Amino acid sequence: MKLSFVVNGQPREVEVRPMARLLDVLREDLRLTGAKEGCGEGECGACTVLLDGQSACACLVPAAQAQGATVLTVEGLAEDARLARLQDNFVRCGAAQCGICTPGFLMTAAELCQRGQALSRAEVRDAVAGNLCRCTGYQKIIDAVEEALCADQPR
Amino acid sequence: MLTSHAEVLSPRTLQEALALKASHPETVALAGGTDLMVLIEANKLDPSRVLNLWGVAELRGLDAQDGWIRLGALTTWTELIQSPLLASHAPALVEAARTCGAAQIRNRGTLGGNLANASPAGDSLPPLLALDAVVELGSAKRGLRRVPIERFFLGYRKTALERDELITAIYLPARVEGDETFFRKVGTRRAQSISKLSFCGRVRRQGGQVTLARLAFGALGPVPLRAHTVEVALEGGPVRPQLAELLLNDIRPIADVRSTAEYRQRVAVNVLRGWLETLAG
């Protein structure tokens, strides 16, 4: 099938098998390797992207369901000044160890920032429960997300 | 890398979807993909054709009609959680939705998919049983039919769905004032884990007497089940927590990778007794 969709603001067209995983289309066909493959079954969140504004595991989305959709990957975050602050926070808080889980956490956090609700620390923990960090560096990740949500006011 | 070469049919209307299911009955229906993609990836399923329902607008939406709440089959867990209508009419179902997967899964996984997948551990199933839900099935030839949820599950991952049918909607009776409900999922972790067991209860009381009891368990056997013996014993009297012991007449838990039969049996009784004690005050 010819998959036509918008990735990080750019209209893209690519010839793929309709059951190809969005994750493979992004990584192999579009060479956007930010989304990582961890478990390949929706448990770890390393492949999280925003699909029409909602976080989704790119390993569970067949290409056919991305037809006409808008996809945001970690590569597209930095273009938006407000969301770049989320990335700054991860850097400043030391919220990365080996780094494999970082793009996924950033995308889940980006969905939270979009929503703009104030969340307690416990709620932040709950909201990112679908992302696993096997270095177990959760405290600093939660710090970074919490700070981003607090700072997420119009400048 | 998913190597499936399945053809994907993507209808835009329900009529089109039902016609495709009728002409290609071997087609596997795909909603949010959170179960199906995992099965395909694990080579447990290798469909030649997939019916992608995601773009069928008629299968979406959630509204109140004549004493019932209608939930389109494609209603996602996230939509269940965000619905003010369900917060007042089906808080136990909302609670179950909160325990399902994590944000990424809840944004894609659907109620219809949870029913069609028919895992006995499906998170929505005990609340749907306790709330006397009705499943609406559609086919191109025979139109729509409604099946009470208790008659929908026929065996392990076997449902009343015929090969030419799709789940179109789930109906819940509007909440009756005074109905009290409770949901509890027991698993290794709050997020992502599959239930060791889950429970949803509903009682209606008038003047301290139980007039209706619904007790539903998930992940205890091949199908989600109701505890009819305890329900009958509860109805017609005050809430007596010791009736929880009768549960052993209704359940014969399985042992599997997630838990032993003994654990499930004991915890099922304890969860039920705990709730009945709270009700008895």
Image (cartoon, coloured by chain):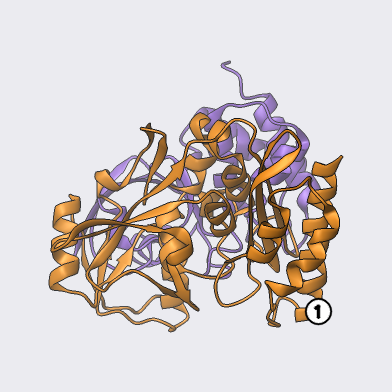
Chain colours: A purple, B orange
Q: Nearer the viewer, residue B257 or B151?
A: B151
* Residue B205 placement: quadrant: top right
Mark 1 element type: helix
Q: Amino acid at mark 1?
A: Glu
Relative vertical location of residue B118 with respect to residue B108 in this rendering, above or below: below
Q: Residue furthest top?
A: A155
Q: Image quarter for residue B226?
A: bottom right
Q: Residue at x 26, y 76 (%)?
A: B6
* Residue B215 x/y as whole percent: 65, 57
Give the vertical position of B167 relative to B171 (above or below): below
Q: Can residue A132 be seen? A: no
Residue at the (41%, 62%) spot, across then down: B33
Which residue is pictured at 69% across the width and 66% down the height?
B197
Closer to the camera in the image, B44 or B248: B248
Q: Quadrant of residue B229?
A: bottom right
> Percent position (x, y) of residue B97?
57, 49
Q: Residue furthest front?
A: B236
Q: Answer few, some or many: residues within 10 Å of disc 1's Cα (few below 14, many 20 plus, some between 14 and 19).
A: few
Q: Position of residue A92 (x, y in %)?
A: 73, 38
Chain for numbered disc 1 = B
- Residue B122 appears left or right of B161: right
Question: Image quadrant for the N terminus of chain B?
Answer: bottom left
Q: Nearer the viewer, residue B228 or B27?
A: B228
Which quadrant is home to the C terminus of chain B? top right
What residue did someone put label 1 on?
Answer: B262
